[in-house]
Image (spheres, rainbow, N blue to C red):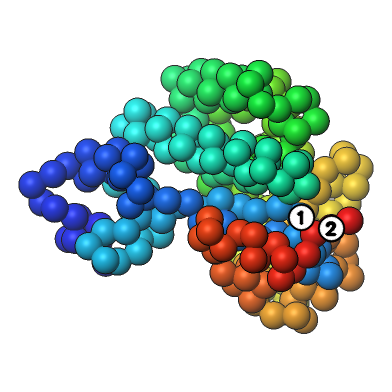
Amino acid sequence: MQLSTICNPINNIETEFMAGLTSGVIYPVFQPIVNNNKKILGFEMLIRWMVNGKEMTAGEFIDDIKSTEAHIKLANFLIDAAVKKIIKYNGALFFSVNITVLDKIVTEKLYNIISSLKEKYLNNELIKLLVLEFSESLDFYKDSKSVDNIKTLSQLNVTIELDDCFSSRSVNFPVRSMKFNGYKLDREVVSAFSKNIYDESLIRSLLYFCALTDSYCTAEGINNYNEMHELYKIGVRRFQGFWISKPVLENELDSTIRYFGLVK
């Protein structure tokens, strides 16, 4: 369903979006990222929008959000929430945030936002628990400044992760231009690797690269135990997917952590 068909046609979608960030109808949900024993390492923060009683995922509305101001406000909203959770759980968990736009203006604003939060609340170790995810579908060649912008943010000592690795939408794999702390395998390659030696070889090559560069690899979209077990056997150590847990609301975080337990 298109967002425009259920939003108030009198109002601009972006106007409603901006208002929703302060009114509570736009809110974060949290999907656990676990080890092979299903103990929680951290959470990816995703965004939801309640519109006329229907919960919309980011994929249903984010392409309609065009303005730089709106993307900055969204990033600020999520990063602020992530920092509060890092503090609440005493640095036991990381929280990752998807960065949807990365031009110079956004980078400068994000740098200032994170720098201010770091100065107020976090030391150099705790700030590493704030993970910024950048999609591999970003065209790093078309926008040559994207790599420079990511490098600028990495100076704050946050963790930088490349999302959607080896997806069908991939534009390029910019690892020569930028050292990422982590790489997240796209759900497409995760679901196909056991039946496709080429996909398995891609994953193995990334794992070898991660071992050489002191980075990590996360498998997204885990559908069953066998997938997780086979990926673990070849070296993957972080897992995420609806089979493990659906994204949970903020008021369900504590019970989710109690249910799965934390890595000790």
Residue 208 vs residue 67, the one in the foreground: 67
- Could one spot residue 171 in this view of the protein? no
At x 35% / y 61%, what residue is drawn? 56
Check disc 1 and report its element: helix, strand or loop: strand
Residue 123 left/right relative to 16: right
Instruction: Give the vertical position of 242 relative to 211 (above or below).
Output: below
Would residue 47 appear left or right of 66 to someone viewing this image?
right
Q: Which residue is mark 2?
A: 263
In the displayed structure, 97 sits above or below 190; it is above
* Relative horizontal placement of residue 48, taking residue 66 as reference (left or right): right
The residue indicated by pointer 1 is: 41
Nearest to N terminus: mark 1 or mark 2 = 1
Residue 205, above or below 79: below
Q: Are marks 1 and 2 in contact (CB under 8 Å)?
A: yes
Q: Nearer the viewer, residue 66 or 166?
A: 66
Secondary structure, mark 2, is loop
